[in-house]
Amino acid sequence: MTDYSAGAAWMNGKIMPIGQASIGVLDWGLTHSDVTYDVVPVWRGGFFRLDDYLDRFMTSMAELRLEPGIDRAGIRAALVQMVAASGLRDAYVAMVCSRGAPIVPGTRDPRYCANHFFAWCVPYVNIIPPERVAEGVSVYIPDDIHRIPEDSVNPRAKNYHWGDFTQGLFAAKDRDFDTVLLTDHAGNVTEGPGFNAFIIKGNRVVTSDHGVLHGLTRRTAIEMCQVEGFTVETRPLPLTEFLEADEVFLTTSSGGVMPVARVNDRLFGNGAPGPQGMALRDTYFRWMEREDFRDDIPYDS
Ligand code: PLP
């Protein structure tokens, strides 16, 4: 039997162990970061909000003028078949569309590349280990590294332009922080490597609406907060306001809602995860099993 314990990939209609999947060295996805992708979680044997993730992926491809050569129903079927074959019950499932290799050797004309779709899945990823989340995440906000401006790279089309995040992660790790969060050039909080950021102040919840990916966990968090009776504001979020919050939390498909205990030298909740953020974290994992958000996977066994 094929061993899919490390994950599986779907390449050109074939499903294979992830270690066998590869793309060519001339692919613009690699040489120019000219690629879009999306990541949907699988939880307890079912996709969470699959149609919402597919909607975002289709929009990202259209925005970047990428043509995957497969329609939405075909992409959906590929993801379902791949995860079913992998046997993974909790998974991180990536769908990718790359510009591909030039059809005309050496061309700089993006119209002459062989766009292609592929997908892969690995066991569920927590971008911050759950034991660290239980203690409260620490976040570094540098003052000398900023998120790439949204009129240079559209953050709502999910992308691999992570140079700013990688530089920021080195700066954060050098200082023993769990992760980094970047501001824009006007001093507003944007997003981090794989997550959106929220504040709670009284009965108000605020998250940025610009310079960020509109995360699906962000959307779920907004809906959860509305159910809890918070007033939710999506607007620019100045760093000064951010640092005066009662609580801060991060949202990601790779770990859910993650309460923050420290930002730079500012402690929240005396350095422990806030109670409202922790309650939202629990609710998120319950919502991951909601029937109306779920597509069960037809595993072989
Ligand atoms: N912002 C960025 C830059 C991301 O890469 C991600 C996810 O990978 C997010 C935000 C969170 O989005 P989602 O909740 O859809 O995972």
Image (cartoon, rainbow, N blue to C red):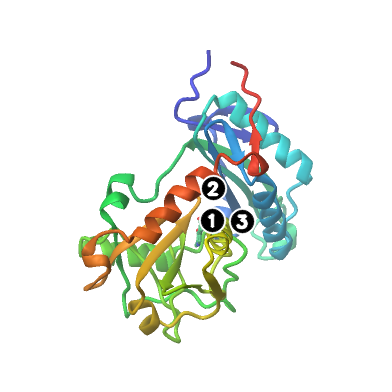
Image: 108 above or below 211: above
Residue 88, visible in the rendered structure: yes
- Provide residue 189's location: percent of width, then percent of height: 43, 76
**What residue is shown at x 25% (from left), y 61% (from top)?**
177
Residues under numbered marks 1 and 3 in contact, where contact means CB atoms less than 8 Å apart:
no
Farthest residue to the top: give it: 1
User: Which residue ends up furthest to the bottom in the rendered image?
Assistant: 186
Measured as percent of width and height from the top left, residue 166 is found at 37, 62
Q: Residues within 10 Å of mark 2 (few under 14, many from 20)?
A: few
Query: Are dots 3 and 2 in contact, CB under 8 Å?
Result: no
Is ligand 1 less than 8 Å from the beta carbon at label 3?
no
User: How far is mark 1 from mark 3, CA to CA?
Assistant: 18 Å
Q: Which residue is pictured at 61% across the width and 66% down the height? A: 156
The residue singled out by tag 2 in the image is: 25
Q: Which residue is mark 1?
A: 217
For the residues marked 2 and 1, what is the alpha-carbon distance in whole angstroms? Answer: 33 Å
Q: Give left or right: position of 223 versus 173.
A: right
Q: Which mark is residue 248?
A: none
Does label 2 point to a residue whose CB lies under 8 Å from ligand 1? no
Q: Which of pointers 2 and 1 indicates the residue nearer the eye?
A: 1
Q: Residues within 10 Å of mark 3 (few under 14, many from 20)?
A: many
**Image coords of residue 245 (percent x, y):** 36, 75
In the image, what residue occupies the spot 51% across and 37% down? 91
Q: Which residue is mark 3?
A: 36
Q: Which residue is at the front of the view, 223 or 146?
A: 223
- Mark 3 is on which residue type? Thr
Whether the residue carrying mark 1 lies under 8 Å from ligand 1 is answered with yes
Q: Amino acid at mark 2?
A: Val
* Location of the C terminus (image quadrant): top right
Q: Nearer the viewer, mark 1 or mark 3?
A: 1
Disc 2 + disc 1, Cβ < 8 Å: no
